[in-house]
Amino acid sequence: MPPPGFSAAAAIHRGPPLVDGACRPTGPITILVGALGGEGGGTLAQWLVEAATAAGYPAQATSIPGVAQRTGATTYYVEVFPRPLADLSGRRPVLSLLPVPGCIDVAIASELLEAARIVGSGMVSPERTLLVASTSRTLTTTEKMAPGDGRVDSARLLDVARVQSARLCAFDMDAAAKETGTVVSAVMLGAIAGSGTLPFARDAFEAVVRASGRGAEASLAGFARGWDAVRTDAPMAAAPASAAATPAADPRVAAVPAAARDFVALGHARVVAFQDEAYGERYLARVARIAAAERACDPDGRHAHALTRETARYLALWMAFDDVVRVAGQKSAAARFARVRREAGAGPDDVVHIVDHFRPGIPECVDLLPPWLAARVAAWDRARQARGLPPWSFPLRLRSDSATGFLALRLLAGRRGMRRRGARFAREQADIDRWLAAIERAAAVDWSCAFELAQAGRLIKGYGATNERGKRNLAHILDHLADGGAFATPEARADALRQARVAALADEGGQALDAALVAHGVPARSPVAQPIRWQRRTPAGTGAQAHPERTE
């Protein structure tokens, strides 16, 4: 209960701030903060309370901690009474520990989907709430797990935020924090201060940041960026233009249709970095084949060379496949060590240990072997599995920050020359050529069929079982939809190809793909044979007695 003589309505009111006879608000100012783990949300709440307290205003903060960087956000709730203690004649307001839907003055989120979650919980009010949201995204686990593009549409999130709030200010807080060398909480503090919601000056906020000690100057720079963004209602940051968007200096890339040139330039650079210049020449020759096929089937350019562009995109990704050489190169790259130090928040004098855990099996070990030898080793492992043994593999723990571990990674990364003679390289090139040949055959009949086959290159992604499953799905589509099946028109075949591609990306198990195949009169995929493994189990109390048990 509030002290005698103090207005209970003013103490616990959760609607729009009350106003007394002097036109001063008497209800609490409410601020809701949504941040991810490690972004300094607790520091931000502390800064707000300290700034209010130093200015003589009653304030209180509570928090609900999350689980991890992206499995749960950490929510902070701050209430500041808008009249200084000196004006309350010894009375103190009763501040709430929990936010109330629709009664938030400022809601701020360090990530766009977190802003949408705050809106979805009903905390944001179109009549009252200023919503400050970062346009940056940190993908959720669900978004990353999707076989296709599982990202939530950022434009839709912004539209919802705009409609549901009294005012929306959206800018890239993550970029502002990185550019100023600080954490995003400093940028968020600047945005809250710049909104003018709290009744004290900018100096009060800057004083608590300066008093925080280490990194204060960088935090003040980030604070200024947030202040300016809200004060000037900065437009939402656009994605930076690609360096390859400018005309390529390489005449071979410049010969590609302009609409596809940016993808071809990026793809060429990727495959050259993956292997060598000769491999880059092969990439450009393959793109030229598709460009010629598209010119033949679409001489007027009605489709803006979309077939060449999409083929160039997925061809580059496929040609630069993940293998042990590429992984070793990425693990030992200078940019990777810099990123790990940055994410760990390590200073110049801090020592950071990096331990990489691998479990290579037969597929990884035989990638660089000649095809005949790789086939013999793979047959040996299949025979082992047929006897009920698990696939051969061994655990490997490598200190990549040590001289020995780093040298091992660099030696493996330098084995690029062995790729061309390896079994994996030969298989990938054969599969790529088969896909491109199917696109060319389809282009001779109908542009839309060829385009859908080019888009089917999206099925090839990841590594290990995911990569093999994608290649099996694509091969089945090429066998039974691209060249087989009975379709009345090319448009019907193109629609079947599109539906199969979408279904293949819908789930890892492939049930949706099988249903789509059957719906178009072609056979579903054959099940992949799995060995039956037998394990001995000793029931309790029976000593050495053993019973076979079937396991999947």
Image: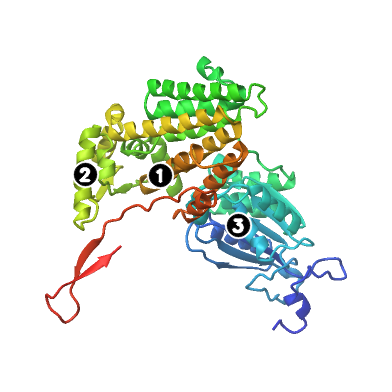
Left of 530 or right of it: where is 109?
A: right
The label number, if any, that marks residue 173 in the structure image: none
Disc sitting over residue 114 in the figure: 3
* Residue 63, image x, y percentages: 57, 67
Total numbered badges shown on the rendered structure: 3
Q: Amino acid at mark 2?
A: Ala
Of the two numbered discs 1 and 3 on the same chain, state the one appearing first in sequence: 3
Can residue 305 be spotted in the picture?
yes
Residue at left offset 65%, top offset 54%: 205
Mark 2 nearby-residue class (10 Å; few <14, some 14–19, many ≥20): few
The span from disc 2 to disc 1 (Cα, nearest Å) is 20 Å
**Residue type at mark 1?**
Arg
Q: Are marks 2 and 1 in contact (CB under 8 Å)?
A: no
Residue type at mark 3 is Glu
Q: Name the residue rendered at 74%, 47% in the picture.
A: 231
Indicate the secondary structure of the residue bearing disc 2.
Answer: helix
With respect to residue 32, does 395 lie above or below? above
Determine if residue 202 is in view: no
Secondary element type, mark 3: helix
Count residues near mark 1 (Cα–Cα under 10 Å), then give few for <14, some for 14-19, many for 20+: some
Q: Position of residue 137 (x, y in %)?
A: 57, 49
Q: Position of residue 544 (x, y in %)?
A: 11, 75
Res 11 quadrant in image: bottom right
Q: Which residue is mark 2?
A: 379
Counting residues from the start of the chain, the first of labels 3 and 2 encountered is 3
- The residue to which callout 1 is attached is 472
Query: As displayed, is residue 340 above or below residue 83?
Result: above
